[in-house]
Image (cartoon, rainbow, N blue to C red):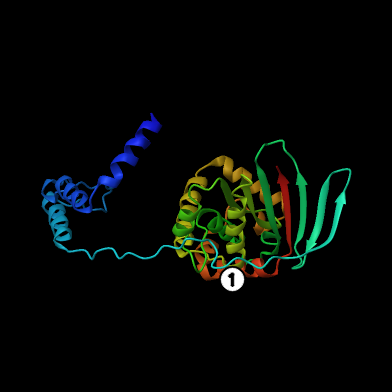
C-alpha cells in the first residue's frame, strides 16, 4: 500500500550514503553499454546519418567532462518581504444579498460573501479592467500572450517560473491567470488554510510579474502550428467569415492572429503591456466561500 511504501522510504532513506548512491549510478549508467537512436522525419531534403556518424557524435559528447552542478540556496518564500497591511474604507453590507463591499486605501474595490456550499473552499477573483478592448493594430495579441505566460509560466524578477512552481508544490490552492474581452485577471481557489499562499503569488505577479522569453517563443511556435492546421479546415474558414461579418472586420475578434502580427510580437512588447495594466488598471476583487 501507499502507507507501506512511505514507511519503507522513511526507514531506508536515512541509511543511504552519498558514496553508495554514486557507485550505484556509475554501475547502472555505464556508458559502454549505451545504445544510441535517432528519430527523424523521412523527407527527401533531410540526410539520414549513418551508424558510424551517429556513434562519432555520441563518443564526442561522452568525451567531454561536464562541470559539476553548483549548489545554490533556493528561495523559500514567494515574497522578499510581507506587504504592509492596507486599510478598509467605506465598508457597506447589503443585508438582502449578504455581500459586504469596501474600498481599500489603494483604490481597489473589494466584495465578500460567505458561503459554505463547498466546505473549506474559497474562491477569489482579482480583475484588472482593460486589455484586449484597448488593443490596436500594433498591440494585437499582447493581452493573450501576457495572460498565457502568467498562467503557464508565472515568474517575477526574483523568482523563475520553476522556482515559483516549486514553492507552490504541496499547497492546497490553485492560481491561474486569464483574459476576457475587456479584463485581465487572476483566480485563486482552494483551502482557507492555504489561500494566503495563493494571494502572495498574485501579489508577487501584480507588483513584479515577468514575462519569460521561453514562453513567448513557444507561443509563437504553437500559433504557427495552429494556423497550418486551421487553414486546412473548411469549417474554420466559415467561422472566420462569420466573425468578419459579425464584428465588421475588427481585428481583435478574428479567430486567429495574422501571421505577420504573430512574428512581430516580442517579449519586451508583452512585458510593457502587462506592466501598464498591473500598475494603472482599476482592480476589483471578489471573495466567495467558506
Q: Is residue 260 visible?
A: yes
Q: How many marks?
A: 1
Q: Is residue 224 visible?
A: no
Nearer-the-camera pick, 91 or 282: 91
Q: How far across and down, in percent of the image, does residue 155 sit?
A: 51, 62
Closer to us: 99 or 58: 99
Image height of 119 relative to 279, above or below: above
Image x and y of residue 191, in percent = 61, 44
Q: Nearer the viewer, residue 189 or 267?
A: 189
59 relative position to 144: left or right: left
Q: Residue furthest top?
A: 1
Please name the residue shown 77% across and 67% down the image: 105
Q: Left of 103 or right of it: where is 161?
A: left
- Residue located at (59% from left, 59% from top): 200
Q: Residue at x 66, y 54 (%)?
A: 253
Secondary structure type for disc 1: helix
Compared to residue 241, the image places residue 212 above or below, namely below
Is residue 118 found left or right of 227 in the rendered image? Answer: right
Q: If the image is split into quadrants, where does the C terminus sit?
A: top right
Q: Position of residue 126 (x, y in %)?
A: 68, 56
Figure quadrant of the N terminus: top left
Coordinates of residue 192 in the picture (x, y in percent): 64, 46
Instruction: Locate residue 68 relative to residue 213 in the image: left or right.
Output: left
Q: Is 36 placed above or below 163 here?
A: above
**Which residue is label 1 attached to?**
272
Task: Categorize mark 1 by other alpha carbons within 10 Å: few (<14), some (14-19), many (20+).
Answer: some
Q: Residue at x 58, y 44 (%)?
A: 236
Amino acid at each position: 500500500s501507499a502507507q507501506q511504501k512511505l514507511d519503507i522510504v522513511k526507514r531506508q532513506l536515512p541509511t543511504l550514503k552519498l558514496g553508495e548512491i554514486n557507485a550505484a549510478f556509475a554501475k547502472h549508467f555505464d556508458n559502454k553499454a549505451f545504445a544510441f537512436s535517432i528519430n527523424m522525419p523521412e523527407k527527401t531534403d533531410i540526410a539520414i546519418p549513418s551508424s558510424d556518424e551517429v556513434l562519432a557524435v555520441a563518443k564526442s559528447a561522452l568525451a567531454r567532462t561536464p562541470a559539476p552542478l553548483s549548489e545554490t540556496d533556493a528561495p523559500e518564500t514567494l515574497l522578499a518581504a510581507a506587504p504592509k497591511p492596507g486599510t478598509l474604507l467605506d465598508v457597506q453590507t447589503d443585508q438582502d444579498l449578504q455581500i459586504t463591499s469596501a474600498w481599500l486605501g489603494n483604490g481597489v474595490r473589494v466584495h465578500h460573501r460567505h458561503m459554505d456550499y463547498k466546505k473549506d473552499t474559497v474562491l477569489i477573483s482579482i480583475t484588472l479592467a482593460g486589455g484586449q478592448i484597448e488593443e490596436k493594430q500594433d498591440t494585437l495579441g499582447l493581452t493573450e500572450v501576457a495572460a498565457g505566460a502568467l498562467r503557464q509560466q508565472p515568474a517575477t524578477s526574483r523568482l523563475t517560473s520553476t522556482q515559483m512552481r516549486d514553492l507552490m508544490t504541496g499547497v492546497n490552492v490553485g492560481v491561474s491567470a486569464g483574459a476576457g474581452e475587456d479584463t485581465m485577471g487572476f483566480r485563486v481557489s482552494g483551502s482557507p488554510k492555504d489561500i494566503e499562499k495563493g494571494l502572495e503569488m498574485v501579489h508577487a505577479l501584480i507588483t513584479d510579474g515577468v514575462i519569460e522569453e521561453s514562453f513567448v517563443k513557444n507561443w509563437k511556435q504553437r500559433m504557427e502550428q495552429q494556423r497550418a492546421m486551421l487553414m486546412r479546415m473548411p469549417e474554420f474558414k466559415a467561422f472566420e467569415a462569420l466573425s468578419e461579418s459579425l464584428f465588421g472586420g475588427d481585428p481583435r475578434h478574428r479567430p486567429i492572429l495574422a501571421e505577420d502580427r504573430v512574428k512581430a510580437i516580442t517579449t519586451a512588447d508583452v512585458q510593457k503591456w502587462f506592466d501598464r495594466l498591473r500598475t494603472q488598471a482599476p482592480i476589483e476583487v471578489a471573495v466567495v466561500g467558506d
